[in-house]
Image: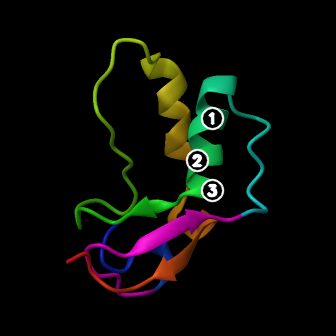
Amino acid sequence: MNGTGTLGLSLPMGAKLRLKASFDITPYTIEVQAILKAMKTYGIILADIGSDMFLTGSPDSRWNDNDLAELKNVKASDFEVLKMGTIK
């Protein structure tokens, strides 16, 4: 998610976002649902100002890359801003 993205806001590095409670996770695989539930509960932190929406994580051979590709369907507009400040 970049500085403006589809949220229409200028987001600083370290901004905390949470996947909206209304986001329907049922079409996703069980493994991806676990990630989406964590995003609803704990949120995510903006750590890059590259492409409009790109979720990254640590490589792990236990994850199925085809399943993880489902995360490309999650849009910036599916998140709500929790905190605009930067991490210190």
Give the CA separation, mark 3 to mark 1.
11 Å
Across and down, in percent, residue 33 comes to 66, 35
The residue at the point 35 percent across, 87 percent down is 10
Task: For mark 2, give the secondary structure.
Answer: helix
- The residue under label 1 is 34
- The residue under label 2 is 38
- The residue under label 3 is 41
- Where 49 sits versus 67, above or below? below
- The residue carrying pointer 1 sits among few (fewer than 14), some (14 to 19) or many (20 or more) residues within 10 Å by Cα, namely few
Work out which residue is located at the far top of the displayed protein and give it.
61
Q: Residue 49 falls in which quadrant of the image?
A: bottom left
Q: Is residue 10 magenta?
A: yes
Image-based side of 8 in relation to 88, left or right: right
Give the CA separation, mark 2 to mark 1.
6 Å
- Where 58 sits versus 22, above or below? above
Q: Amino acid at mark 1?
A: Ala
Q: Is residue 36 magenta?
A: no
- The residue carrying pointer 3 sits among few (fewer than 14), some (14 to 19) or many (20 or more) residues within 10 Å by Cα, namely few
The residue at the point 61 percent across, 25 percent down is 31
Label 3–label 1 contact, CB within 8 A: no
Q: Which residues are magenta?
A: 9-20
Label 2–label 3 contact, CB within 8 A: yes
Label 2–label 1 contact, CB within 8 A: yes
Give the CA separation, mark 2 to mark 3.
5 Å
Across and down, in percent, residue 51 comes to 29, 59
Across and down, in percent, residue 41 comes to 62, 56
Question: Which of the image's four quarters has the C terminus?
Answer: bottom left
Q: Amino acid at mark 3?
A: Thr
